[in-house]
Image (spheres, rainbow, N blue to C red):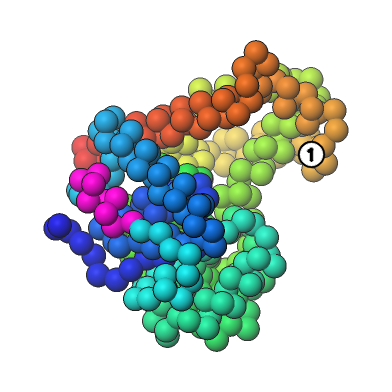
Amino acid sequence: MNNLQEGNIVIIGSGLIGRSWAMVFASGGFRVKLHDIVQEQVSTALEDIRKQMEELMKSEMLRGTLSMEDQMALISGCTDLKEALHGAQYIQECVPENLDLKLKIFSELDLYVNDSTIISSSTSCLSPTSMFTGLQHVKNCIVAHPVNPPYYVPLVELVPHPQTEIATVERTYNLMKKVGQSPVKLMKEMDGFVLNRLQYAVISEAWRLVQDGVISPRDVDLVMSEGLGMRYAFLGPLETAHLNAEGFKSYCERYGESIKRVLATFGPVPEFDGEIAEKIDQALWEHERDKDDQLKAGREYRNTCLSHLAKLKKEMKKN
C-alpha cells in the first residue's frame, strides 16, 4: 500500500463525529485506532464506516488517493485504552459534550501518552482551560473543533490552552492540512469559539423573525440556503461585503448607518423554548413520515450535497 503516513491516529469515541474523523485520517493515509468502551459500539461503527465508504466510492466522492479497501484496512477498533494509544502521535477525543466525562478521559490519557503525543478535543463549546488545566501534558493539548460531519465539511477550529506550545498548534495545523481539512487558528480562547458564535447569531435572529411573525420557519431557511448560503459557500461575510462595494472600507461608508439602524432593532436573546420552539419544530417535520426515517434521509441528503459542493470547490480552486 503506497502513500502511508508515519504514526498512528487514535479516535476516542465511536459516535458520528468519531467515525467521520476516522474516515478523514484514513483518507490521508494514516493508521487509525477507533476506541470505545463497548465492543458492540466499535463493531457497529466499523460497519457504518464501511457502508459510508462504499457509498462514497460508488458516487466517486471518496477522499484521498487510496482505494476504499486500503482506507478500510487502515481503520481498526479497540476497547483497551492503553493498547489503543500504543504508537499514537495524535489523539482526537470525540466523546459526548460533558465536561466531567471529558475530564475523566483526559486524566486517563495523561497517564499513558508520551511527551510528543498531541491530545486534541472535538468539543464545540467547552474551553481548553476547563478541560486541560492541571494535566502533565498540557503543552500538548489543543481543541480541534470540527464542523459536523468533518469528512464532508473541512473547517477545523484550533483553540490552544494558554499553556499550549506553539509547536503543538503548528503540528496540528499541518496535520489537518495534510488530511485535506481547512484549519483556522484562534489566537485566544473565546466562549463558543468562532463558528458557533456566528451560527448562534444567525439562529437567534431566525428565531426572532419567526417569533415576530415576519417569516415562516421554512422560508427563513430558504433565505439562507438559496441566498446567503450560496455566497457563503465560497466567500465569508467580510469578503462578501468587500466585493459588494469598492472594498470593505467603501462598504462600511455606504452601508454602515443602515447596518447600525437594523442591528438596533434586534431583540433580546431568546429563551429557546416554549411556543416558538414548538412552532419551528412542527414546521420542520413531515408528519406523514417516521421521524427517524426523516432524520436519516435528511442527513444523507446533507452529506451528498456537501460531497458535491466539496468536489466543486476543489475544482474551482484549480482554475
Residue 50, image x and y in percent? 35, 43
The answer to whether residue 57 of the structure is visible from this angle is: yes
Foreground residue among 209 and 306: 306
| Segment colored magenta | 67-75
Q: Residue at x 85, y 28 (%)?
A: 275
Where is 289 relative to 190, above or below? Answer: above
Residue occupying the far right of the picture: 274
Q: Residue at x 43, y 34 (%)?
A: 303
Residue occupying the far front of the picture: 40
Q: Residue at x 29, y 71 (%)?
A: 7
For residue 106, side relative to residue 231 (left or right): right
Residue occupying the far left of the picture: 2
For residue 231, side relative to residue 7 (left or right): right
Foreground residue among 170 and 59: 59
Q: Was residue 157 drawn as part of the magenta stretch in this picture?
A: no
Residue of label 1: 272
Where is 122 relative to 246, above or below? Answer: below
Q: Residue at x 65, y 13 (%)?
A: 288
The answer to whether residue 242 of the structure is visible from this angle is: no
Where is 128 relative to 176, above or below? Answer: below
Foreground residue among 111 and 219: 111
Helix, strand or loop: magenta stretch: helix
The quadrant the C terminus occupies is top left
Foreground residue among 197 and 143: 143
**Dividing the picture into quarters, in which one does residue 134 lie?**
bottom right
SS at circle 1: loop
Residue 300, image x and y in percent? 46, 30
Residue 211, image x and y in percent? 80, 27
